[in-house]
Image: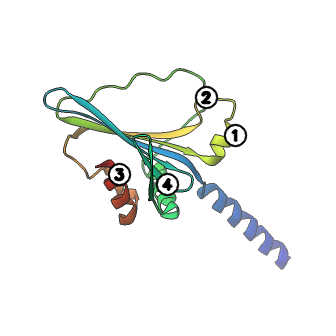
Amino acid sequence: MKHYLTLLFVLVTFTTYCQNNRTIHQVHIQIDKRSAGGETTQKYIGIDSKGFISISGKKTTNKINLLTFTNGIQNLIIGEKIEKTPAHNNAIGIWEVPRRNKKFVFIHIIFSDDFNTDKDFIFKSSYELTETDLDINQTDYNFFKYFEKEDIDVISKALE
């Protein structure tokens, strides 16, 4: 009986760990800005499954701590109550343009298990968050509260 309870505890703990500790396949963070004159600019960073960062499609040698970053991503999804967008093959709508002197931030998260499960779909299951109507000079984003300072510094530098 004692061994049975120990085995049951290990199985429940392992299952909970696996559900709460998913690996990241890819994270995109995109910023769209519109100046007072109406000019729009866009910048995005990508973070891959090994923690390497690309800036506007160009690979860099910059890397994020994948363990703390993944924990931050999981906390973001839970804290902001972000629901999973199912995989699909439908066309994606056109982005809205920010108002003058404003910007928005869009975060798109794909976990490895979803990526592998959704092979038959063009657009994989994902989690998405948008912060809109931000001041054009704002650099302290609401989603930062879920991340360690080290991760915030890396993301902020990449988004400069």
Q: Are marks 2 and 4 in contact (CB under 8 Å)?
A: no
- Which percent across, then down, holds residue 23? 60, 54
- Label number found at residue 158: 3
| Residue occupied by mark 1 | 117
How packed mark 2 is, by other alpha carbons closer than 10 Å (few <14, some 14-19, many 20 or more), is few
Could you tell which of marks 3 and 2 lies nearer the N-terminus? 2
What residue type is disc 3 on? Ala
| Residue occupied by mark 4 | 52
Could you tell which of marks 4 and 1 lies nearer the N-terminus? 4
Q: Nearer the viewer, mark 3 or mark 1?
A: 3
Cα distance between the residues tagged 3 and 1: 30 Å
Could you tell which of marks 4 and 3 lies nearer the N-terminus? 4
- Label number found at residue 122: 2
Of residues 12 and 101, the one drawn nearer to the viewer in this rendering: 101
What residue type is disc 1 on? Thr
Image point 59% across, 37% down: which residue?
125
How packed mark 3 is, by other alpha carbons closer than 10 Å (few <14, some 14-19, many 20 or more), is some
- Residue 131 appears in the picture as rendered: no
Cα distance between the residues tagged 3 and 2: 28 Å
